[in-house]
Every structure is written in structure tokens, then in C-alpha cells.
Image (cartoon, helix red, strand yellow):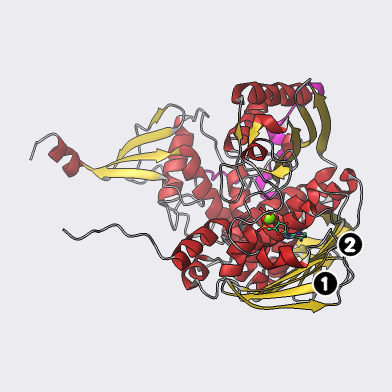
């Protein structure tokens, strides 16, 4: 028999390893910036072109790399940060695997210029696809500048998996945001295609948070500090009114390292108990400090996750602390306060029987007509069941109400297309760096929907809004819009902005699960759903009804 197992050639091994560390352009930035922080820099400048695909340059004023070190810095597993096995048990630096530069060097054209603090001159190292092309002496300031060009040129597959340039840029802004939040004592700047995205001076944590998260959110967060003999917890958590579906404003730092932890997320969410709706999350920035020995950071190739030596103890500490903070702040949350009260609310978006005000395609239930639906059963205060035209129909009352309201609001919105009301005085909102970027990327569509927004240095000056929206809800409307725009909907008939606004209105004004419906309310819901243009799904894409005809039912009972 022929031997089937062979060791992979070194180039393939290197490519596989590189793929684990560098997933997208933002991973390069994370690795380079962390190296600069490990080198003690207090100023880090980042320049990118074409969302990092053409070029990424990171310039720091840290300790620099001397020539002998530079020569081997891009070989696999070369690091100056750990020397022996024991060091792995208490890692204080961000890097320790010696893989980042080696990985980046494999899949790009790399140029490192660096001068160590005790050297009179610097060196420049040029590498292409992992091979050293050139090492020479250059005159440069103390510190390091690393330029990465043509990322993924040798891994076309990886390129195919990248998202749009706009999305990749948002990943980069998100990455720089969390690095900047953890290091307010460092100056950060980020330029993209010659546009300054951020320029944060060395500042206090409070000011850094305002700049990164936006003061519109920051002012609605509760600050806290909690110490016990082993652990320290400090940071800011959002009041329930800031809750939203996306989790991109949840920043957890463990020993200043940005960590993704579903477990801690769930724990925090559960501390809010009923203050949050099912799929909603509050923003937070939490710094947890624990003894280095109590933590294993060597569990994930990009060091995105960690393992605790005594998990229960830490989780209990976090949960108790957060609950205490929320309790102290005496948060009481009245859901209704955040619901929309549009002008249409007074005339009730819930359709009335034979309401002449509703648009034509809403064939309204006519009690004299022979399509009368009787005997509608409500199950579990959630499902309505009936027999209609020889079909057994089950509908989800909330999904159905959303669909009906969606079509009503959509018609209304389209009728008023582009009509806005002026805000006097205008409203200024200061959003997070990532939110701002999404608004900027979609500003034309947003204007067409009836907003008048001026973008000024990360701030929004809003002077007019679509008629159908209430000014009090503006921050919430815009943040939800931002969340929706991150994953544009696929429907072609209307644009993503309109879809998002109308969806919000529909959802907030709809009958909820758990609500008892009278017989006539059940009939209205049924008839109005059947009259919808698209009765089978709610605006979020979930089904509104399930049906089966009597023949199929008969077959199931082997009657045919
Ligand atoms: P690691 O950070 O895990 O040690 P890297 O591949 O990221 O591995 O970097 C290899 C080594 O190159 C580092 O250990 C460090 O000595 C040096 N280095 C990289 N970037 C810088 C920098 N910006 N300033 C100073 N030294 C650096
Ligand atoms: Mg590193």
C-alpha cells in the first residue's frame, strides 16, 4: 500500500498559520498596534488605503527594533516577549507567540523601518511573500514604522471571503476604537484615503469614551468601580434606554486585552432581568483586572478569547457587581415611554373594521360578506387558529400585526415621500465612530428619506426629519437605522433606509405576544393580514402564518 500521509510543504504550513492570525485587514492593524503598545509607544498613527487592502502603515514612537532583531523579527515564532515555558503562565504583554509579523510577511509586501532608542541610525527591512529582499541602513526617528502593501496578494481565496470595502473599513474603525478605549494615555490617529477618521490626543478615560462612543451615548451610561481582594471591575454600562439589537458597543477588557466572551455578555444581559427586550443589548465598556496567573490567554489564534482558571468565582463576582450597580441606580424602565407615538397613532395604526382611511390594497373585512371568519381560537396568547376557505391557518399574532402595520406605514411613508418637518432648534448628535461611519456611507439615501443632516467632524447636525418620525425618538431611530444598514435588506422595491424606518414604526406599534385579543380583534387581524400585499412574512422575514389544506390533513389521518 502507498503511504497516504505526507507532511505539508513549509509554504503551505506558513499560509495556514497566517490565515489563522490574519483574517482581514483589521487583524493586521490590531497586531501592529499591539506591538507598538508593547514597545511603550505613546503615539500611534495609522494610515490606510482602500480599507487596508492596498496599504496599511502603522507608525509608533516606541522603543524600536535593533538591526539584529529586525533581521529575524519576521521568522515564525520569534518574539522578545517570552523566553521560557513559565512565562506563558503570566503573560503581561499583548504579543507572545511571535507569529504576527511572520504571518503578515507571508501574505503581503512588508517594509519595516525602525530605530532602537539607543541607536544612532535605523534599519529598513523589505520582505515579499516571506522572503527577505533587502536590509539596509536608513535615517529614521526612534520608533517603528511598518508598511503592509497588497495584503492577501498570495491568498486570493481569503480575498474572496472579505466583505465590501465599506464593511472592512468599519471593522478597522471598530478595532481602532477598542484599542483606543483601552489606552487613553496613547495618542491615536487614523487616516483613510487621506481622510482623517479620528485623531485622539492623550486624554482621560472619560474623554476617550466620549470621543469613541459618542457623547450622545456616553451621557446615558452609569459609571462604576468595584474591588475585591482578587478582582477589580470598573467601567460604564448603558441604561436600558440605550438597548439595541447590535452588540457592537460592548467592550470587555480583561487585563486591558479586548476579549469576546458570550458567557460574560449573557451574564450582563441577565443582570438587567426584565429591563431588556429579548434580543436587545446594552452598550458597556468594562475593565476587569485579575491576577495574570488566573488567566489563560493562550487559547485563541487571534487571542480574542481567554480561559479563567476559576471561572465560577469570576463570573459570580461580575454578576453580583453589575446587579448591585443597576440596583443602586434604581433603574426603572417603562417600556411604553420608548414606543413611537406618531400622528398616525391617534388614528390607531391597528386597522379598524371597514376603516375607509386605509389604502386600497387593504381589502377590509366586511361582516356581511360571506368570507366571514368565525371561530378563531387564540392559543397561548400568541397564536390564532382557524379554518378559512378549506385551509387550516395558524398565525403568529405579533408577526402578523407587524406585517399589517408595516404595509400601512409604508404606504403612508411613500405618500409623504421626502416630506420633512424642520427642527427648530436643530438637534446635534454625537455618535460612536462606527455609527458615524455608517451614516456617512449612507448619507444620500438618508437624505432622500427626508432627513437633513450635516456631518461635521463626527457630529451630526440634524435640521429636518421625515414627517412620520418624532424628534424625541431621534437617537433611537438613528441607532436602529445604523444597525439595519449594517446588513442591508435584500428587497428591491424600497431602499434600506425606508425599510428600516418603516420596520421600526411597525414593530413598536404592533400587538405583542402575550396579549389577549377579543373576538373582533382576532377577526380584524386575520382579515387584514390576508389583505396584505405580502401576507406571509413579517418585516423581519419571519413567517406570519402556517397553513395546511383539509386534504393534506385528511391524508395525515389516512382518510383518502
Ligand atoms: P510578538 O508580538 O508575539 O512577540 P510579533 O511577530 O508581533 O510577535 O513581533 C515579533 C517581535 O518584533 C516582537 O516580539 C518585538 O520584539 C518586535 N516588534 C514588532 N513590532 C514592534 C514595534 N512596533 N516596536 C518594537 N518592537 C517590535
Ligand atoms: Mg505581536
Binning the other alpha carbons within 10 Å of mark 1 as few (below 14), some (14 to 19) or many (20 upward) gives many
Highlighted magenta segment, given as a residue range: 327-353
- Frontmost residue, 237 versus 544: 237
Circles 2 and 1: CB distance less than 8 Å?
Answer: no
Indicate yes or no whether the magenta region holds residue 329: yes
Indicate yes or no whether the magenta region holds residue 237: no
Which residue is the site of mark 2? 118
Ligand 1 lies under 8 Å from the Cβ of mark 1: no
Question: What type of secondary structure mainly makes up the magenta span?
Answer: loop
Report the residue at 86% width, 74% height from top. Answer: 140
Left or right relative to 542: residue 249: right
Which residue is the site of mark 1? 122
Report the residue at 68% width, 33% height from top. Answer: 335
Q: Secondary structure at mark 2?
A: loop
Q: Quadrant of the N terminus?
A: bottom left
- Frontmost residue, 263 versus 87: 87
Q: Quadrant of the C terminus?
A: top left
Q: Position of residue 12 (x, y in %)?
A: 44, 65
Amino acid at each position: 500500500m502507498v503511504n497516504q500521509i505526507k507532511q505539508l510543504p513549509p509554504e503551505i504550513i506558513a499560509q495556514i498559520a497566517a490565515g489563522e492570525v490574519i483574517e482581514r485587514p483589521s487583524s493586521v492593524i490590531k497586531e501592529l498596534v499591539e506591538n507598538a503598545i508593547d514597545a511603550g509607544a505613546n503615539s500611534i498613527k495609522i494610515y490606510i488605503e482602500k480599507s487596508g487592502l492596498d496599504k496599511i502603515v502603522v507608525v509608533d514612537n516606541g522603543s524600536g527594533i535593533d538591526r539584529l532583531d529586525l533581521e529575524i523579527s519576521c521568522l515564525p515564532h520569534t518574539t522578545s516577549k517570552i523566553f521560557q515555558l513559565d512565562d506563558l503562565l503570566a503573560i503581561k504583554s499583548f504579543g507572545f507567540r511571535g507569529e504576527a509579523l511572520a504571518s503578515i510577511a507571508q501574505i503581503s509586501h512588508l517594509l519595516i523601518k525602525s530605530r532602537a532608542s539607543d541607536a544612532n541610525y535605523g534599519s529598513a527591512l523589505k520582505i515579499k511573500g516571506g522572503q527577505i529582499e533587502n536590509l539596509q541602513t536608513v535615517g529614521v526617528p526612534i520608533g517603528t514604522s511598518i508598511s503592509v502593501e497588497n495584503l492577501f496578494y498570495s491568498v486570493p481565496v481569503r480575498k474572496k471571503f472579505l466583505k465590501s470595502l465599506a464593511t472592512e473599513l468599519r471593522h478597522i474603525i471598530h478595532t481602532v476604537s477598542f484599542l483606543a478605549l483601552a489606552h487613553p494615555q496613547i495618542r491615536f490617529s487614523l487616516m483613510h484615503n487621506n481622510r482623517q477618521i479620528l485623531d485622539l490626543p492623550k486624554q482621560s478615560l472619560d474623554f476617550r469614551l466620549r470621543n469613541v462612543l459618542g457623547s450622545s451615548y456616553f451621557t446615558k451610561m452609569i459609571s462604576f468601580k468595584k474591588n475585591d481582594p482578587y478582582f477589580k471591575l470598573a467601567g460604564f454600562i448603558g441604561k436600558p434606554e440605550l438597548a439595541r439589537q447590535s452588540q457592537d458597543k460592548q467592550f470587555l477588557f480583561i487585563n486591558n486585552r479586548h476579549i469576546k466572551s458570550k458567557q460574560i455578555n449573557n451574564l450582563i444581559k441577565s443582570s438587567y432581568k426584565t429591563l431588556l427586550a429579548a434580543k436587545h443589548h446594552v452598550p458597556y465598556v468594562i475593565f476587569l483586572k485579575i491576577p495574570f496567573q488566573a488567566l489563560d490567554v493562550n487559547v485563541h489564534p487571534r487571542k480574542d478569547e481567554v480561559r479563567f482558571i476559576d471561572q465560577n468565582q469570576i463570573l459570580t463576582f461580575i454578576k453580583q457587581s453589575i446587579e448591585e450597580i443597576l440596583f443602586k441606580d434604581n433603574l426603572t424602565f417603562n417600556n411604553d415611554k420608548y414606543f413611537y407615538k406618531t400622528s398616525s397613532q391617534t388614528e390607531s395604526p391597528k386597522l379598524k373594521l371597514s376603516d375607509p382611511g386605509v389604502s386600497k390594497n387593504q381589502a377590509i373585512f366586511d361582516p356581511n360578506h360571506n368570507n366571514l371568519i368565525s371561530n378563531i381560537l387564540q392559543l397561548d396568547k400568541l397564536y390564532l387558529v382557524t379554518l378559512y376557505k378549506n385551509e387550516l391557518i395558524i398565525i403568529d399574532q405579533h408577526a402578523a400585526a407587524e406585517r399589517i402595520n408595516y404595509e400601512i406605514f409604508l404606504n403612508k411613508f411613500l405618500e409623504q415621500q421626502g416630506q420633512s418637518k424642520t427642527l427648530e432648534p436643530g438637534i446635534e448628535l454625537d455618535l460612536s465612530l462606527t455609527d458615524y461611519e455608517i451614516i456617512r456611507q449612507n448619507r444620500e439615501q438618508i437624505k432622500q428619506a427626508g432627513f437633513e443632516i450635516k456631518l461635521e467632524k463626527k457630529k451630526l447636525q440634524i435640521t429636518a426629519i421625515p414627517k412620520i418620525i418624532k424628534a424625541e425618538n431621534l437617537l433611537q431611530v438613528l441607532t436602529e437605522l445604523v444597525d439595519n444598514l449594517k446588513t442591508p435588506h435584500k428587497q428591491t422595491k424600497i431602499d434600506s433606509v425606508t425599510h428600516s424606518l418603516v420596520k421600526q414604526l411597525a414593530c413598536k406599534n404592533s400587538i405583542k405576544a402575550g396579549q389577549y385579543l377579543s373576538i373582533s380583534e382576532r377577526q380584524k387581524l386575520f382579515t387584514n393580514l390576508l389583505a396584505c400585499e405580502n401576507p406571509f412574512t413579517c418585516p423581519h422575514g419571519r413567517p406570519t402564518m402556517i397553513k395546511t389544506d383539509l386534504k393534506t390533513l385528511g391524508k395525515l389521518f389516512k382518510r383518502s
